[in-house]
Image (tube, grey):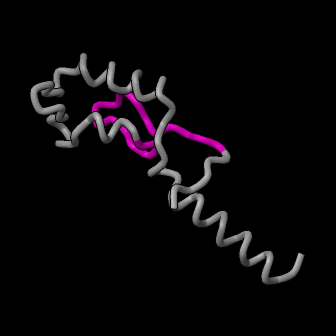
């Protein structure tokens, strides 16, 4: 492998790591996350907002790198996911 190919491979790996938190979770993970949110005392359903982090939960729960501030769910790991650029 040439030096240029090695550099390109390293840059591709770095790009994948940088974009990984912004990739969407699978539908079943999204449903599980939102189920926790909808039962949480810190969730305001009228505005779909968490009162701890003030995020719109239907959007935050979609992202692999998101975490629940109350600890009900953590970031989701997706292996071999291509960056969305």
The structure residue drawn at horizontal position 62% and vertical position 47%, both measured from the top left corner, is 81
Q: Quadrant of the N terminus?
A: bottom right
In terms of depth relative to the viewer, which is nearer, 7 or 41? 7
Q: Residue furthest front?
A: 85
Rendering quarter of residue 45: top left
Q: Residue furthest left?
A: 46
Q: Is residue 18 left or right of residue 70?
A: right
Q: Is residue 72 left or right of residue 28?
A: left
In terms of depth relative to the viewer, which is nearer, 33 or 85? 85
Rendering quarter of residue 12: bottom right
Q: Position of residue 16 (x, y in %)?
A: 59, 59
In terms of depth relative to the viewer, which is nearer, 13 or 27? 27
Magenta: main secondary structure: loop
Q: Over which residues does the magenta segment extend?
A: 63-79
The structure residue drawn at horizontal position 12% and vertical position 33%, both measured from the top left corner, is 47
Q: Position of residue 17 (x, y in %)?
A: 57, 58
Residue 69 located within the stretch drawn in magenta: yes
In terms of depth relative to the viewer, which is nearer, 25 or 65? 25
Q: Position of residue 50 (x, y in %)?
A: 19, 34
Residue 8 located within the stretch drawn in magenta: no
With respect to residue 48, does 12 lie above or below?
A: below
The structure residue drawn at horizontal position 17% and vertical position 42%, both measured from the top left corner, is 54
The structure residue drawn at horizontal position 56% and vertical position 56%, both measured from the top left corner, is 83
Q: Residue furthest right?
A: 1
Q: Residue furthest top?
A: 39
């Amino acid at each position: 492998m040439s030096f240029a190919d090695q550099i390109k491979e390293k840059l591709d790996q770095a790009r994948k790591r940088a974009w990984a938190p912004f990739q969407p979770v699978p539908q079943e993970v999204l449903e599980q996350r939102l189920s926790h949110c909808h039962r949480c005392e810190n969730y305001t359903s009228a505005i779909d907002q968490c009162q701890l982090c003030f995020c719109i939960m239907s959007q935050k729960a979609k992202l692999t790198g998101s975490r629940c501030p109350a600890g009900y769910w953590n970031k989701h790991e997706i292996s071999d996911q291509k960056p969305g650029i």
